[in-house]
Image (tube, grey):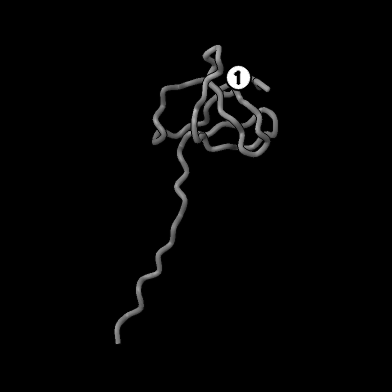
């Protein structure tokens, strides 16, 4: 008799860059940066949909940190 196959677990590995939404106060993992027509970088909150103007720090996804939010754009 053979051994049963090993159990495999999938653990999501979040990216290291996050921000705190100014509208709903959620801690959000950054999926992508976007820019307004004026060139202001922002990230949309997946929980409430608010556009949060953020500071581009130049960090890569592997560098941990909470990105500063300057204001809401909505």
The percent position of residue 67, horizontal first and vertical second, equals 52, 27
Quarter of the image where the C terminus is located = top right
Give whichever of 22, 49 is nearer the camera.
Answer: 49
**Depicted 36 relative to depicted 12: above or below:** above
Q: Which residue lies at the image location 56% right of the left edge and 28% below the top edge? A: 43
The percent position of residue 56, horizontal first and vertical second, equals 48, 21
Q: Which residue lies at the image location 68% right of the left edge and 36% below the top edge? A: 48
Q: Which residue is mark 1?
A: 70
Residue placed farthest to the left in the image?
2
Give whichever of 41, 66 is nearer the camera.
Answer: 41
**Depicted 71 relative to depicted 8: above or below:** above
Image quadrant assignment for residue 53: top right
Q: Which residue lies at the image location 59% right of the left edge and 30% below the top edge? A: 44
Give whichever of 14, 31 is nearer the camera.
Answer: 31
- Relative to 56, 71 lies left or right: right
Residue placed farthest to the front in the image?
37
The percent position of residue 33, horizontal first and vertical second, equals 50, 27
Q: Which residue lies at the image location 65% right of the left edge and 33% below the top edge? A: 49
């Amino acid at each position: 008799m053979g051994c049963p196959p090993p159990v495999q677990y999938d653990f999501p590995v979040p990216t290291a860059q996050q921000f705190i939404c100014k509208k709903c106060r959620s801690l959000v993992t950054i999926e992508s940066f976007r820019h307004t027509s004026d060139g202001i970088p922002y990230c949309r909150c997946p929980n409430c949909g608010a556009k949060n103007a953020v500071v581009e720090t130049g960090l890569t996804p592997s560098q941990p940190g909470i990105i500063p939010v300057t204001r809401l754009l909505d």
